[in-house]
Amino acid sequence: MKKNLNYDKSRIFASRIHDRIPGGAHTYSKGDDQFPVNAPAAITHGKGSHVWDLDGNEFIDCSMGLTSVCIGHGYESVAQAVCDAAHRGTNFQRPASIELEAAEIFLDTVQSGDMVKFAKNGSTVTTAAVKLARAYTKRNRVAIAREHNFFSFDDWFISTTPCDLGIPKEIKSITALFSYNDYQSVELLLADKDHDIACLIMEPVKFDPPKDDFLQKVAALCKDRGVLLILDEMISGFKWSMQGAHTYFDVQADMTTWGKGIANGFSACALTGRAEVMELGGIRAEGEDKLFLISSTHGAETTGLAAMLATIEAFKAENMIESNWLRGEILKSTLEKIIEKHQLNSFLKILGYPCLFALACHNSKGEVDDFYRTLMMQEMIARGVLFQGLFYPTWSHQQLEINHISMAFDESCKIYRQAIEAGSTEQLLIGRPVKPVFRKKI
């Protein structure tokens, strides 16, 4: 099954792009240091769950644009809605009529909050939520779950990572940390009645499920201590349910942020929340202090909103979430059986839910290891599966794709078994290992 992949054009592309674009990509997770050396340097186009690179090599896409492409590349009804919107004009001097339609349909769909503010990227809406919380509570600090690796490219979050170059040291005191599924760590932050925590932000779920009513306990504590709860559905939205993972786990937030998979890869993000909080960013309370919430030229341009509306319509018409869960369960179960077949249960672990799961790679000592993770990525890519550690089953991953991924995984596990037995990837890994996005040194 291993493919004879040609990368002549990819090599030329890779040698040029870093001279023009810092990092060689506009998202660090797409950079060269995040993939093995046999990965394609650039994608020219995609259709469904398949993508093609500069040299014409074809791959099955496992993570679908960092999970933003929630139906499939080039899905016809979404693409047509975008084209139609573009022909009618994308940006005007006053709000486009589609803005109200999009707001009403989105709020009715996600059933989370009374008002919505649209934007083009997730960092914009998470930072807006923090700003609203500070204004509403008259407090300054934000508490974040340390296990959740990305909330914003803004200073309040990046200052907590090793990549803090360029951020004033004074900023670091703005953000406090707690641990997901550790209720006592949240209690400790809010123990002092004079605490300065304005809001607490976390994802409803990552891969480990919430335990012992953690989400409900935190929501109740926040309400009791006057702290606004912000749930980040940037990844989980439109995967666990149309109403997000917080509805799946039966917990409500004061504000919720949405993005990635709500517009099938087009740029549309949203902040929803209670009216009394969201209205602080409005202009109807004359005489009150004005909060400058989100004001961006392209925040609600029509093509992104049209893509979102068409995506919602397709999800409802085809019952896509239920379908994704069913096929995800089949794929997850199949991969677990393959791991067991190769006696790799102590070294390869599948984490998460059928709608989104990840592969954790351990070395022969049982330690999480980037060399071994890169080896698995390398072998999957060599067999026509563009793999970065995530499995995101979408409407476009039908049985043929599931079969291909499973066969590639089976053959890759054979190679992984060799590395475990040898106690090293040295004779098997081509080139350097991948590196963490958040690291102190380049």
Image: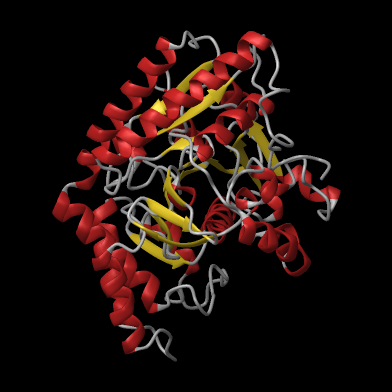
Asked if 242 appears above or below 94 in the picture, the reply is above
Residue 421 at x, y percent in the picture: 62, 9
Q: Is residue 401 above or below residue 264?
A: above
Residue 89: image x %, image y %? 37, 88
Q: Position of residue 233 (x, y in %)?
A: 43, 46
Q: Residue furthest left?
A: 317
In the visual, does 393 lie left or right of 432?
left
Residue 295 vs 391, above or below: the answer is below
Residue at point 22%, 33% (across, down): 326
Name the quadrant of the C terminus.
top right
Residue 437 visible in the displayed image: yes
**Residue 240 appears at what percent x and percent y?**
32, 38
Name the residue: 29% across, 62% down: 75
**Count of numbered badges drawn on the protein:** 0
Res. 259 in view: no
In screen coordinates, is 295 left or right of 269? Answer: right
Front-lying residue, 318 or 5:
5
- Residue occupying the far front of the picture: 4
Type of colouring: secondary structure
Residue lying at 75% horizontally and 46% vertically, measured from the top left? 159
The image quarter containing residue 12 is bottom right
Q: Which residue is drawn at 46% across and 25% down?
A: 411
From the viewer's side, name the closer residue of 78 and 113: 78
Quadrant of image for the N terminus: top left
